[in-house]
């Protein structure tokens, strides 16, 4: 059988999803000719289909030695690198693919995803760095927790499956304990009028339940308060903490994001209190 016939047999095996057979054929071809870029490329496809991404990376790197300006090979290399967790390398490969073929839609799509993962990872790393430098108590610790929580929210909002999801609970628990045991609260510069008094009273009662860890009572009152007004960052913040303590993490994240959308400087470590005098 000629090299061409063997190559066609490999393609036929690929079309029939006979990946193990195709892998053997293309493996034979590259053994016979290590410069056969097409055989290396299709061998990489077989490796990816069989969940052997590390071998696919090697095969594509060999293919690109002979065909360095092949946009499709750079794109597939990006996919293989991404599958092995090498996100920076994947992004670089997608960029190279687009440089060679600006109309490569898949490369553009996956580059956006890779860059999002990189951004999410950096926010998470910054959060961990902040937590590692935090103190046990005091204003410095509150500042670190505040910034770390912001970084985790950003990380998760960019990439919902960010590992920050597994760490954010620890930060929120520390913040809640600081409010309850250390009295981390602040007076709000909000003028309570006769029109807003009933709403303010509901909110303040909710805060008192938060400080007593009566989360269900706080939840009911905060929901009522938000029906009256939903434009106050401090109410959404208290609501977020309450949702966290009834194990609604998705709701918690939505409310924390809403808090920062309303006031990007809001102190997430302190419970806002109204003066009802």
Image (cartoon, helix red, strand yellow):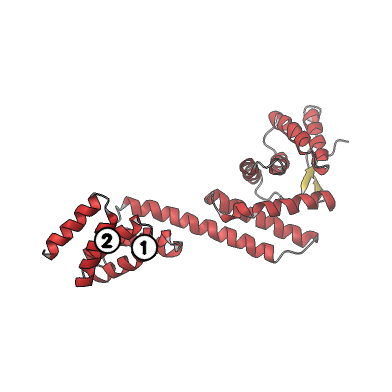
Q: Which residue is mark 1?
A: 93
- Front residue of 62/107: it is 62
Q: Name the secondary structure under disc 1.
A: helix
Q: Can see residue 249?
A: yes
Q: Is residue 154 above or below residue 69?
A: above
Q: Image point 27% across, 71% down: which residue?
A: 65
Point out the frontmost of discs 2 and 1: 2
- Front residue of 60/242: it is 60
Q: Position of residue 193 (x, y in %)?
A: 80, 31
Q: Position of residue 276 (x, y in %)?
A: 85, 35
Q: Image point 12% across, 60% down: which residue?
A: 5
Distance CA(mark 2)–CA(mark 1) = 24 Å
Q: Is residue 11 above or below residue 262?
A: below
Q: Which residue is mark 2?
A: 23
Q: Position of residue 212 (x, y in %)?
A: 83, 42
Q: Position of residue 4 (x, y in %)?
A: 13, 62
Determine which quarter of the picture holds residue 215.
top right
- Front residue of 229/4: it is 4
Looking at the figure, which quarter contains the C terminus?
Answer: top right
Determine which quarter of the picture holds residue 145.
bottom right
In the image: residue 148, left or right of residue 56: right
Numbered circle sitting on residue 215: none
- Front residue of 188/75: it is 75
Other residues around mark 2 within 10 Å, as few (<14) / some (14–19) / many (≥20): many
């Amino acid at each position: 059988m000629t090299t061409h016939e063997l190559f066609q047999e490999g393609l036929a095996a690929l079309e029939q999803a006979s990946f193990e057979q195709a892998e053997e054929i293309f493996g034979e071809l590259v053994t016979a000719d290590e410069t056969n870029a097409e055989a290396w490329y299709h061998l990489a496809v077989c490796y990816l289909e069989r969940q052997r991404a590390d071998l696919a990376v090697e095969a594509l790197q060999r293919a690109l030695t002979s065909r360095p300006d092949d946009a499709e090979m750079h794109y597939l290399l990006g996919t293989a690198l991404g599958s092995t967790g090498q996100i920076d390398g994947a992004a670089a490969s997608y960029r190279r693919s687009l440089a060679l073929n600006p109309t490569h839609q898949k490369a553009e799509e996956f580059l956006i995803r890779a860059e999002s993962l990189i951004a999410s990872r950096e926010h998470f790393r910054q959060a961990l760095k902040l937590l590692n430098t935090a103190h046990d108590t005091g204003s410095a610790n509150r500042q670190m927790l505040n910034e770390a929580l912001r970084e985790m929210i950003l990380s998760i909002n960019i990439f919902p499956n960010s590992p920050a999801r597994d760490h954010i609970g620890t930060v929120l628990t520390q913040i809640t304990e600081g409010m309850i045991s250390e009295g981390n609260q602040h007076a709000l510069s909000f003028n309570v009028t006769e029109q807003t008094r009933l709403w303010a009273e509901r909110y303040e009662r909710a805060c008192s339940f938060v400080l007593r860890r009566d989360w269900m009572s706080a939840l009911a009152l905060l929901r009522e308060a938000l029906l009256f007004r939903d434009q106050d960052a401090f109410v959404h913040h208290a609501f977020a903490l309450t949702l966290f303590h009834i194990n609604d993490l998705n709701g918690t994240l939505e409310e924390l994001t809403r808090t920062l959308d309303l006031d990007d400087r809001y102190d997430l470590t302190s419970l806002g209190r109204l003066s009802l005098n």
